[in-house]
Amino acid sequence: MSAAEIDHTLAGPKSEALATATEHQGRVRVALTAALAAEPSHAYLFRGPRGSGKRAAARAFAAEVLAAASSDPEDARRRALLDPSPHPDLVWLAPTGAQHMVEEVRERVIRAAAYRPFEGGKRVFVVETAEAMRDESQNALLKTLEEPPEFVHLVLLCSEAEGLLETVASRCQAVDFAPLPAEVLERELMAEGVSADEAAAAARLAAGDLERGRLLLSDPGRELRADVERCLAAALDGTCASAPWKGLLDRAKAAGEDAEAAAREALEEESKAGMKRSAKDISDGAKRAGRRRRTEMLALAFELCAAWLRDLAAVAAGAEEVAFNRDCLGVLRSQAQGTDPAAARSGAERVQEARRGLELNVSEELALEALFFRLEALLA
């Protein structure tokens, strides 16, 4: 499609949701609009960082596919856009815990794809966080991806491409989402009523992820940032013997326990509603959700530590305009006095090394203890 044809297509009211969902993803907007103007592929892989708009784009795209095959396009579109959607031909699968349950993928996607549409002429299956499918589920999905019924369209959403089998990815048409610019995140966060400095800091620390930006502005996010600041202040002051990193561990543990409880409740509700799940399935799924959340919070803490040290190096070098922690410049200026910028940059590298070590199942507490004593030796 030419640029003029795309603009004309997007101008119609039917594409308003898609245009809104891809407002900051121009290439995605062009690709999906062209697909709708022709015949959509049987399988898509929406890949890109968390918070880049994949979910909203998938819902809007699915709504247009279903509307185009319906005798009442407006009603089909309206119901498909609701979240959760009551449209019987839109199946949306999100992991309740850390991973998709194998039987759920088989029942709700692979087997369900064989059934003809309940209304209209199309069915759309969206698998959110597709990398959270076990290899068994991904391999089982291959035949459906290769030879789906003509009325079926599958959309896989993926934030970590390395978690998806190449055999799965190669059978899908890829649609790449870019990280959202910090300026876009800042505008979105400012619209939610936070201060300009805090929105600016969260937008830059979020690394293109609007959901992470919102987390950083929540009470748990603010508390996590405060814990990180206390740990690094201890390293700078030479007081790491007080074990300040235990606050980070406690915060991550609490987040994991909350996620485990929420996942257990959701899994039990689904079991009562008829989803086949044993007590072991529920327990294992809830525990995986808890572990995943705890790991995510610790990974975020490491990233915040590295960002603070990079900011400290920038401020010490007289370049505070590039700092991410815009709402903490006063503290950074104070800490930067007498701090060697090279040492702070080296500290940021040590943090990233320690974070990678966690992926090798190193003890979280030992990793944090070793990291902060090394930072103390480097910076104090």
Image (tube, grey):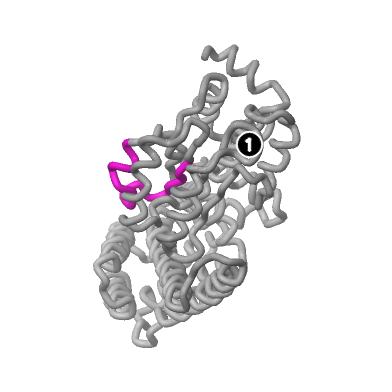
Q: Is residue 25 visible?
A: yes
Q: In which quarter of the image is residue 56?
A: top right
Q: Measured from the top left, where is residue 186 in percent x and y?
A: 60, 47
Q: Is residue 161 one of those drawn in magenta? A: yes
- Report how many numbered discs are placed on residues in the image: 1
Q: Nearer the viewer, residue 292 or 232?
A: 292
Q: Residue furthest toward the bottom?
A: 242
Q: Quadrant of the C terminus?
A: bottom left
Q: Is residue 369 above or below residue 9?
A: below
Q: Residue at (44%, 55%) from the top-left corner?
A: 105
Q: Residue at (48%, 40%) from the top-left corner?
A: 155
The kind of secondary structure element at disc 1 is helix
Q: Is residue 294 visible?
A: no
Q: Residue at (38%, 52%) from the top-left corner?
A: 131
Q: Which of 194 and 289 is in front in this view?
A: 289
Q: Nearer the viewer, residue 265 or 275?
A: 275
- Left or right: where does residue 161 sit relative to residue 324? left
* Highlighted range, magenta: 155-170
Q: Measured from the top left, where is residue 84 in percent x and y?
A: 65, 52
- Left or right: where does residue 249 sit relative to residue 87? left
> What amino acid type should be assigned to the residue bearing mark 1?
Ala
Please rate how many residues cluster around mark 1, counting C-alpha atoms within 10 Å: few if below 14, some from 14 to 19, many from 20: many
Q: Measured from the top left, where is residue 255 in percent x and y?
A: 51, 74
Q: In this view, does 310 lie above or below 80?
A: below
Q: Is residue 26 above or below residue 167?
A: above
Q: Residue at (31%, 79%) from the top-left corner?
A: 369
Q: In which quarter of the image is residue 246?
A: bottom left
Q: Residue furthest toward the front?
A: 115
Q: Is residue 343 above or below residue 83?
A: below
Q: Measured from the top left, where is residue 296 in percent x and y?
A: 43, 65
Mark 1 lies on residue:
63
Q: Is residue 288 one of those drawn in magenta? A: no
